[in-house]
Every structure is written in C-alpha cells, then in structure tokens.
Amino acid sequence: MRSIVWFRGKDLRLADHQPLAAGIAAGEVLPVFIFDPYFFAPERAVQMGHRIQFLLESAQALKAALQARGSDLICLRGASFDRLAELSRAWSADRVLATRWSERFGRKRDDSIASRLQVPFHVFEGETLMPPGDILTASGQAFRVFTPFWRAFQRVFELKAPLPRPERLPSLPPEILALDEGIPGLEELGVVANERLIRGGEQAAWSRLDTFLRGPADRYVKGRDRLDQEGTSRLSADLKFGLLSPRQVWWAIETAEARPGGGAAFQRQLVWREFSHHSLWHWPDLLERPFRADFEGFPWLEDPAGWQAWVQGQTGYPVVDAAARQLLVEGFVHNRARMIAASFLTKHLGIHYQRGEAHYMRYLVDGDWAQNNLGWQWSAGCGCDAQPYFRVFNPTLQGQRFDPAGTYVRQWVPELARLPKRWIHEPWNAPESVLLDAGVTLAKDYPKPIVEHRAARARFLATAKAHLAQRKGLSP
C-alpha cells in the first residue's frame, strides 16, 4: 500500500509519529510538506516571522533526517488540496495520512479535503495526550474548570510507550524526487532572520528536554515562577510544532533515571496544555469571543499611547517592560512574566485582551492558538477557570517576589542595570542620589509609570463591577 504522509507543522518529527508509523507498517510512504499560501504567502509570513523561521529550520532538519534514512521530504507550494490531489495521482497513492489539528479552521480544512480527495484521508492523534473531546464530566459535558478536568484525566489516561524513530524508510523514485520544490528561504518570504531565537529541529528539541530533566525539572515546583532563573522547560515551541510529542515528554519524565522532584508538577502543566486544546475543541469560537458570556460587550478602553508604551516596553514598570522587550527580541516570554504583562494591559490599561493576544501571536515562537487564548482570557478574567476579574497583579510586588535581585529586569531593561535591588522594581520611588549614582534620569532615560497602580486597579474594578452587574446571569 502506498501512503502519503502529510507533515503539517505540528508534527515535525520522526519519533512517535503515528501517521508515519502506520504508513511504514503498510508499505511505501511518501513524506510531504506543502507550503500553502494560507500561511506562507509573504504578506502572511511576515505577520508571524519568528514562528516561520523556527518552522523552516525544523522542516530543514526533518528533511535531512528523512534523507539520512533513505527517503526525503517532498516540499510543494500552493493550495494544499490541489497539490495533494496532484501528488496522489502522480504516485498512484492509496491514501493520505496526517496528524489531527484541534482548531476549527483545521478541522474544516480536513473535512473539505476528505470529501474532495479521490483517495481515503485519515487523521491520527498526536497533538495532545488524549483525543480532544474525550474527557467529559459524568453527565457527558465538557469541563469548564481545570481541577476536575485534571482529576478526570488522571482516572482515564493510560500512558503507552512512544513509537520509536524509524531507522530506514522506503526510497522514493526519481520522478517523485524531481517534484520537490524545496523549502523557501526567509528572504523569499520577506522574513528578517533573528539569531536570538531558539534553534529548531527534532534533535534540538531532545537536547532541551535532556537539559530540563538534568536540572530545572528537579526544582520545577518553585523554579518555574522565578524570572531570574532557568527554571522552566523551554519546550513550548517544541510541543507547538511537534518536534516532541506530549507523550514523549510525559514518558521521559516517568522513566527518567533520577526522577525529577518537580516531574509531577510539570506533568500537571502538560495537562493545562491539554485543557486549553480540549476547551477550544468544545468551544471553537473562543478565538473570537470571551468564554464568559457576561464579558461580552465589556467596555475596553482605546488608549493608543498606553498600547504603544506596553508594546515597546516603556510603561515605567520594569518587569512589565522586560517582558515586552523579551518578546520582541527572543520571541519568548517567561510564563510568569506573560501573566504580569497580560494583567497590566487588560486591567491597569483596560485594553482588550484580544489586542494583546494578537500581539503575542505575532511575535511568539511558541505561539499556539489554544494556549495563547486560554492564557489571555485567564489573565483578563473572562476565560475557562480564569483568575477572578478582581485579582489585579501588582507589577512591583510581582517583580520583587519573582525577580528579587532584579536579574531579569537588568537583562532586558539595561538602562536600570545600575540601580540597587531595593529600587530596581520601583525606580520612581528611588532617592535622587540613588538615581544619580545609577545614571538614571526618570522621564529621560526611563519613563515614569504611565498609570498609578492603585488608581488603575480601582478604575478597572469599578468598570468591571458595573458591567458584570448589568450582565448578571449570563455567565456559564
């Protein structure tokens, strides 16, 4: 049997790849990646340049790995259905295999392709630990709160060993190899290369996992919140693009020779990832609307100056500004810093969470629709199992708690680097002599706070209280 294995950007690996394993088990396989203009037209690619760079690098690594095993990744350009149909005819394929996407537009695409292809089209699981939609309440409903979802997950999840990486693959005939149109370069797509991004590719992902298991995993319970330490896994982009499957990560933690002390806590975070994908599966319009119906029509503010200050890292709150600058430079933001920055935008400035969500999706290497949306709605107080709307992070206290010496701030806000740690998170309160010694003139070298914390908090709480009282009874 001849199987086209369609790699689609969320499964850029050879190990634990169910469509690939199924194809090899049945006979010949033809690996293919299609650079569809839906994502790869230059005008679209530049809107997510960091992710495009990481994906292209990962596709190059996948192509090399397939070549080393006797096959190749046939790269085509154009509309997915058209190119799949042409390829299936040229190779006399018996079927097309792919990994399922959980987002609504991906599901619609798959339904359309399945109905139009002349050969069977099969999708396999692999993006999540459990198929989206499979974890339900006793009454058959979707979970709206994480903790009972977590308990239900623990009851039904059965860990199976990941599929091994194939050592050899069937070779492809010359006439098929000749169809390869190559992986486009960044310049061709109008994307400016950024050397500060993490490296793509399956082997780079395994290296990050190994680094995590050898160090940060053991102190993950507390270390994951510290902005000044390497306490997180840095696997978010690897999971987003499928360089590692969540099953591989879970299995690696379970079978680590020295069981990491924070392994269970990290596994719980993997299930938070699961929760976001299951939520988007059940409520696919979450990308367009708040989960809580009583937040519909919320009177978000138009504040162009505040928005620009937040985007550029010039709010006058050092930890908020450090997060903004890290995003633009590295395409990554520490999760604690993401929460602080999101709380500030939505609650201190009163700006719509969807603007922040879109901004993050533009620059994040690990930008994932389900994950990013859940995080922003959680921070704004309008999502699944969100923090209460009346919880407003104090950015000064958050910085002092999770970046006590100011290491994170000094890295990303270097104009404050010489301030003593006593004042690093509140330079506006520092004595003039301290500012002078540090070479800082407020409003010149670094801005004064664009809002005052207590006043901004009170404004948001009053606005939210009035709106929610008017909309009372509409929340699910």
Image (spheres, helix red, strand yellow):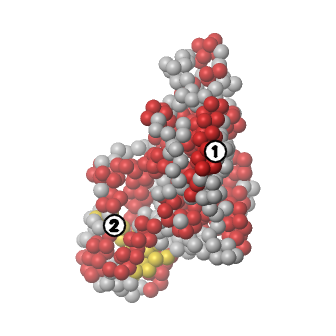
Q: Which is nearer the N-term, disc 2 or disc 1? A: 2
Query: Circle 2 sits in a helix, a strand or a loop, which is it?
Result: strand
Percent across and percent down for residue 255 are 69, 66
> 10 Å neighbourhood of mark 1: few (<14), some, or many (≥20)?
few
> 10 Å neighbourhood of mark 2: few (<14), some, or many (≥20)?
many
Note whether residue 403 is visible: no
Marks 2/1: CA–CA distance: 49 Å
Tell me the kind of residue under disc 1. Lys
Residue shown at 55%/68% (left/top)? 282
Quadrant of the image occupied by residue 245: bottom right
Residue shown at 43%/74% (left/top)? 98
Query: What residue did someone put label 2 on?
Result: 34
Query: What residue did someone put label 1 on?
Result: 465
Quadrant of the image occupied by residue 277: bottom right
Residue 314 to residue 73: above or below? above
Percent across and percent down for residue 442 are 54, 19
Tell me the kind of residue under disc 2. Ile
